């Protein structure tokens, strides 16, 4: 594939709102996880909550979209002058030539949970002010962002569990290659809700302590929330040396099981190999892997096997940043792509926070501390329920 430029990007999660706070937390090897105190949840687990979401007020013209997920989206869009970059791009290429492709898993389902608490006791009807299409519907966040910037190009939501906001890069790349658009706003937004917290608890996948990806004592995930946005453009005639490029994309679907990955990681292997092939790179040219690393016993074991199959045992340094941010589900792919871009731009490889003793049965070269080594090429993995997989290759321009 022809490389694309990440001309502007931003990230908001429990470790920071915007790139500088995010980078500071990564540099300090600091986690943003805390004991769960979200809403009425009564579970012994830890979550990655973004502060200030409830203080966001949507514009009057977009009040129909009001829900936690869209407030989180707006909070994210206000960081790093992202809005100014979008408007400048629109004035340059036209509003109809910018696509919007966002990933989410549960979207604004919290708004529906709140609505069900307010059912009419006599009729059982939902409250009159409840707006499903603008809040709970998976397209809600994409529609909100599109209207927020008054963009008029193609728009879609990808909801493929934890690979959602990695796969949007592929959707945008295909439309750009087809000549349907000149640029794209991609990313993902996912917010805390009771459905995911109690749902993952029912599957015995929640950890009672901060999650520990690839640790011998790992017990499960810590759910987080986040918003990440990227502007993708065709390469200009000249590039800054520290420009970040999307070099390769690999997608697969092994459809092995509704919630468990293929035990040998066949889908993950296919996604990584396709990403390398589309980037025109050999495995040895990747310098760092941002692992999916959810901290469940089976997921990390499967990813370890898959990485060893593609890159060789203990060959490449890698880590999962979910120990810092929690698992942001549908936003994870986008958030970790931005973290990977930061690693490339700032010249370091981030540590796997909260991991203390790497599982000796997992064939990975796991970073327990930051490595002050500048990567040239980074692979970012996102693997979701149902066997939906996506790997991205990001690189420095020079």
Image (cartoon, rainbow, N blue to C red):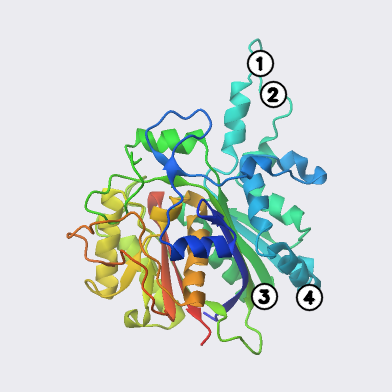
- Is residue 383 visible to us here? no
Which of the numbered marks, if any, corresponds to residue 120?
Answer: 1
Question: Is residue 315 left or right of 33 when viewed as pictured?
Answer: left
CA neighbours of label 2 inside 10 A, class few (<14), some (14 to 19), many (20+): some
| Label 4 sits on residue | 92
Disc nearer the start of the sequence (3/4): 4
Which of the numbered marks, if any, corresponds to residue 221?
Answer: none
Q: Nearer the viewer, mark 2 or mark 3?
A: 2
Query: Circles 2 and 3: CB distance less than 8 Å?
Result: no
Image coordinates for residue 162, horizontal then vertical, percent? 45, 53
| Mark 3 and mark 4: Cα distance apart in space | 17 Å
| Label 3 sits on residue | 179
| Label 2 sits on residue | 127
Outermost top residue: 122
Query: Circles 2 and 1: CB distance less than 8 Å?
Result: yes
122 or 26, which lies in front? 26
Secondary element under disc 1, as helix, strand or loop, is loop
Disc nearer the start of the sequence (2/4): 4
């Amino acid at each position: 594939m022809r490389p694309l430029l990440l001309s502007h990007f931003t990230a908001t999660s429990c470790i920071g709102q915007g790139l500088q706070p995010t980078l500071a937390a990564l540099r300090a090897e600091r986690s943003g996880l805390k004991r769960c105190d979200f809403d009425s949840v009564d579970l012994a687990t830890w979550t990655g909550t973004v502060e200030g979401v409830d203080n966001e007020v949507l514009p009057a013209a977009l009040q129909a979209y009001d829900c936690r997920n869209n407030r989180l989206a707006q909070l994210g869009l206000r960081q790093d002058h992202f809005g100014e970059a979008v408007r400048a791009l629109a004035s340059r290429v036209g509003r109809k030539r910018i696509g919007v492709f966002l990933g989410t898993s549960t979207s604004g389902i919290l708004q529906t949970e709140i609505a069900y608490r307010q059912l009419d006791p006599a009729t059982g009807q939902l409250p009159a002010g409840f707006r499903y299409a603008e809040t709970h519907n998976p397209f809600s966040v994409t529609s909100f962002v599109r209207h927020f910037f008054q963009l008029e190009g193609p728009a879609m939501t990808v909801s493929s569990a934890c690979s959602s906001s990695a796969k949007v890069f592929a959707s945008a790349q295909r439309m750009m290659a087809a000549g349907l658009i000149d640029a794209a706003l991609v990313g993902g937004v996912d917010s805390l809700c009771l459905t995911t917290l109690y749902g993952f608890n029912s599957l015995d996948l929640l950890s009672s302590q901060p999650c520990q990806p690839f640790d011998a004592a790992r017990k499960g995930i810590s759910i987080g929330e986040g918003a990440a946005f990227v502007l993708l453009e065709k390469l200009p005639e000249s590039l800054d040396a520290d420009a970040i490029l999307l070099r390769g994309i690999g997608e697969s679907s092994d459809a092995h099981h509704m919630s468990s990955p293929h035990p040998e990681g066949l889908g993950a292997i296919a996604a990584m190999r396709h990403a390398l092939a589309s980037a025109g790179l050999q495995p040895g040219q990747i310098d760092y892997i941002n692992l999916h690393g959810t901290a469940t016993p089976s997921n990390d074991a499967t990813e370890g096997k898959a990485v060893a199959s593609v890159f060789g045992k203990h060959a490449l340094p890698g880590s999962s940043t979910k120990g810092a941010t929690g698992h942001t589900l549908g936003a994870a792919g986008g958030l970790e792509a931005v973290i990977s871009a930061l690693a490339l731009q700032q010249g370091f490889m981030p540590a796997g926070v909260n991991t203390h003793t790497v599982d000796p049965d997992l064939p990975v070269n796991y970073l327990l501390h930051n490595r002050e080594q500048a990567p040239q090429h980074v692979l970012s993995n996102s693997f979701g329920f149902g066997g939906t997989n996506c790997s991205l290759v990001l690189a420095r321009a020079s």
